[in-house]
Image (spheres, grey):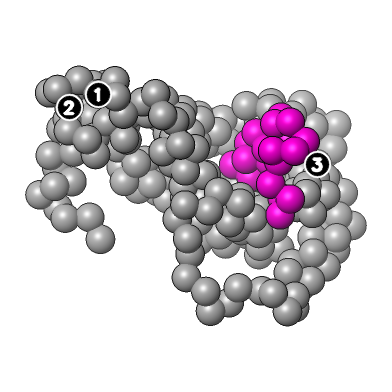
Amino acid sequence: MEDPIRAEEVRAELDEMGLRYFLDVRATVRRMLEQMRGEQRTAFAAAVAERLLREDEQRPVQERLPQLAGWRPVVDSVWRWLAGESGAAREVEVAVGRYYLDPDYPSAQPDDQSDAAAHAVRAALYTSECCLHGCLEFATWAGWRGFDWAAVWAAADPSWLPRRPAEVTPYVWELAHPRLQAELDQQLADLEELAVGGDVLLDGPAARRPFLERLRTG
């Protein structure tokens, strides 16, 4: 748990830089998701998982994370369900069941925060669970994994730390990385989009698809 005094110091330093503090964004995301329906929560989670998958898919083939390939059709099924294909939920249900029944399911293993693949897999899993149940927690957890994924790749950026101004503390400089800030900004933008136009998810497929495509492509 973040020390309250330290959190205030970090928040103040980020505020001076015009940047967001991830704990504040998490709290805002949760408050907004609490007011949304299951379809809206699922769309938020799917947008997070989609970003992670697409980023991996844009890399050269030899650099892609093999653990993620099997989740592409699952996330696609979630988008199809959001677009009005009720049968797609069955595909998601089967994929989730297979994940939990897999002998290699890491039920007792602690998270490795430096494992980008694990964050992306969990984001896709939580998106799938949200599709099936509409739960607040699964949507918020997907958002957390999006931030964690960005944090892993930001930490791998060798050019960032040497550029730290002397007046900025090391921890705040880590949080100031453009990759992290972009993910926080995008999550809030997605939620704003869902809050304003999310009622379209109650309409027919023809009305839903343009909205979902905007959300999917960011």
185 lies above or below 52: above
**Residue name at image x 83 percent, y 49 percent:** 73
Residue numbers of the magenta segment? 47-68
Q: Is residue 10 left or right of residue 162?
A: left
**Residue name at image x 22 percent, y 55 percent:** 2
Residue 106 location, x and y as percent?
60, 73
Whether tag 2 and tag 1 are in contact, CB under 8 A, the answer is yes
Residue 56 among those drawn in magenta: yes
Residue 15 location, x and y as percent?
21, 27
> How far apart are the alpha carbons under marks 3 and 2?
45 Å
Which kind of residue does numbered mark 1 sit on?
Arg
The residue wearing badge 3 is 83
Q: Secondary structure at mark 3?
A: loop
Which kind of residue does numbered mark 2 sit on?
Val
Q: Main secondary structure of the magenta part?
A: helix
The answer to which image quadrant residue 177 occupies is: top left
**Residue name at image x 53 percent, y 79 percent:** 108
Q: Can residue 168 be seen in this snapshot?
A: yes
CA neighbours of label 2 inside 10 A, class few (<14), some (14 to 19), many (20+) = some
The residue wearing badge 1 is 164
Q: Nearer the viewer, mark 2 or mark 1?
A: 1
Q: Residue furthest left?
A: 5
> How far apart are the alpha carbons under marks 2 and 1?
7 Å
Residue 122 location, x and y as percent?
60, 58
Residue 121 location, x and y as percent?
64, 55
> How far apart are the alpha carbons under marks 1 and 3?
45 Å
The residue wearing badge 2 is 168
Residue 111 among those drawn in magenta: no
